[in-house]
Amino acid sequence: MQQMMSKDVIFVQPNDVSPAAFFEGLLEVHIKTKREYYVMNKLSVLTLSALAVSVSSAFAKPPEHSQAQPLLDNQKQIESAAPQRYIIKFKNNGNAVQKMGNRGRSELAISRANNMVKKAGGKVKLSMRHNLAVAAELTEKQKKRLEKNPNIEYVEVDQKRRFMAQDVPYGIGQVQADLVDDSVAAASAGGKKICVIDSGLELPHEDMGTRGGTINGTNDSGTGNWYDAGGPHGTHVAGTIAALDNGLGVRGVIGSNPNLHIVKVFNSSGWGYSSSLVSAIETCANNGADVVNMSLGGGGSSQTEANAMQDLYNQGVLLVAAAGNDGSSYSETDPMSYPASYNAVVSVAAVDSSKNLASFSQKNSQVEIAGPGVNVLSTYPEGTGQQGNYGTMSGTSMASPHVAGVAALVWSHHPSCSAQEIRSVLNTTAQDLGAAGRDVKFGYGLAQTKDAVDYIDANGCSGDGDPDPEPPVGNELVNGETVSNLSATTGDSLYYTLDVPAGATDLSFSINGGSGDADLYVRFGSEPTQSSYDCRPYQSGNTETCTISNVQAGTYYVMVNAYSSFSGVNLTGSFTESDDGGEGGSASASDLSGSANEWTHYYVDIPAGMSSLDVTMSGGNGDADLYVRQGSQPTESNYECRPYRSGNNETCNIDSPAEDRWYISLKGYTNYSGVDLLVEWE
């Protein structure tokens, strides 16, 4: 599968093959990649079309136009123009067609059948020797003539078979995911990021986002590539969350291509250690995850695991896990499963399509909410499912990603809410099942997306009836002036704003002095929360500073939160106004070379007031890839610009670059040499 992760994909249609034959016949398909040709023989129409869709969605850098839609459109045009096609079934007796005895005799029989159709004026399209039948294009008159032939058993329409339409699994409607706009949760819209800790995600897949695009990942030691599935489990789970709403296969809770990070923790035997899970959740946090799904578990708690989960939850990450599959119909309660049963984790039970508790779903006091988990249809590694690239699974492992997806979708509608507030709202708005209130089977009930979004619209994140709290009037900071003697009680917050002009530099906010413990939060454009901010030093005591490197013109919002009651605290916001900015400049490097997968890093210091930063790579041999990033060295998943083109001619254009150190890096896609690099700013 890895060898197909090339940069350019071209379908080559042989010159002597008509468009109709391209879809209907059996032919050789050439996929021309940047490095080599792959040849796949004798693909039928459905296989070819599915392959085109799969390949077009497989690459981190897809072609400008999807392969799927032109193929579908072309197929429709061919169908509408095609003559009526019929299947003619011949009788297995009589003199005109020999009885089938061996291969030679059956071929003779079908040959005579073909001649019979041709004599009637028909055009034979396909011979089915074992069925003693042929497919042919006939006019109505030719059809009636053949129907009168005593050697023909019947003539029937050769029915068209098309791509299967997208199937919306029952769970999507059951959790109301289809009743809200999921575009706000797309990666392109800045939606909440979901981390899936599992057995990996098979990529490319026709119904998932792209590796290196909206989907990235990390390998745990010894588990292999995160994009090579160790069985179908992880691919099924990821699809439940994020299968694309693209008209193919299925759709997930968020069908708009959200940000996913995949952490592969299971070994080839299908298990991993709790220490690996601790490392995995830390990896999720380090990669910016807002929601973590853990469709996994086991008996026995771990203090280390519990502490790690609690710490992450306190930092604003929402953790969701499967309640466990060892439920017993002979007992009122079942043992705890971990990590689901830690207080910091949302434990998810499983229900079926009728909202009945799944027989396997574990029942205990830590069960918090329920999701669809019986016969759930989702993505499979390509070609391995009951329906090709799709298949059904049952388990609380299937329920958990429904809830994780709902949490991310609701949170994306209301990004100013905290993880704790989203968790509380999901429980408050869950559809109560079983005994009234929270119970050991369903927790608070079945997760409901629209009800949760509507609840926050009406009542705010905290449910106090103020959905969009604004900073108190009159709390505007003045550049360089200190506001003194601030105080607040535990859990309360003070709010301020500072208007920053264009071209300003050296922006910082600081608190100091007094007693107790105040925490400083800063965010551009909207009020920060404990989970959404641009800067949060989060130190003990009251001495904290936020230094903003990428200064933007507009309003910065400041929150001073009482971790514990504080008094006598001072707050200052300051910046240096522009003096029309620095001077433009340029830098260059020539005859650069490197090996495949080798990084070479450079940097330039860009002054304030620049309107553009242009980086151009050109010339030489081989293939190097250009990366540009502000403030730190780029990686394959973190950059401001990565053209990712074939060859060495790539350009990055950055508008209004911030005053900062900008890193320009080259990574060898293959060995390269003789490359020139030019950096200009003005």
Image: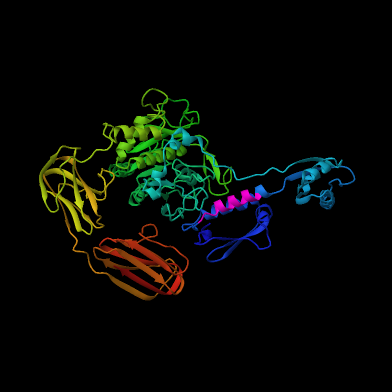
Q: Is residue 377 above or below residue 626?
A: above
Position in image of residue 628 (x %, y %): 35, 63
Image quadrant assignment for residue 365? top left
Q: Is residue 567 visible?
A: no
Q: Quadrant of the C terminus?
A: bottom left
Residue furthest to the top: 436
Q: Main secondary structure of the magenta part?
A: helix
Q: Is residue 160 above or below residue 448?
A: below
Q: Is residue 652 magenta?
A: no
Is residue 237 left or right of 614 when viewed as pictured? right
Image quadrant assignment for residue 18? bottom right
Residue furthest to the right: 95
Is residue 491 left or right of 383 when viewed as pictured? left
Q: Is residue 69 magenta?
A: yes
Position in image of residue 668 (x %, y %): 43, 67
- Identify which residue, 223 or 33, lies in the foreground: 33
Q: How is the image coloured?
A: rainbow
Q: Is residue 530 visible?
A: yes
- Identify which residue, 634 or 22, lies in the foreground: 22
Q: Residue at x 18, y 63 (%)?
A: 579
Position in image of residue 532 (x %, y %): 28, 45
Q: Which residues are magenta?
A: 65-78
Is residue 288 left or right of 76 when viewed as pictured? left
Q: Residue at x 83, y 48 (%)?
A: 120
Position in image of residue 458 (x %, y %): 31, 32
Q: Is residue 267 above or below residue 456?
A: below
Please state the total of marks drawn on the protein image: 0
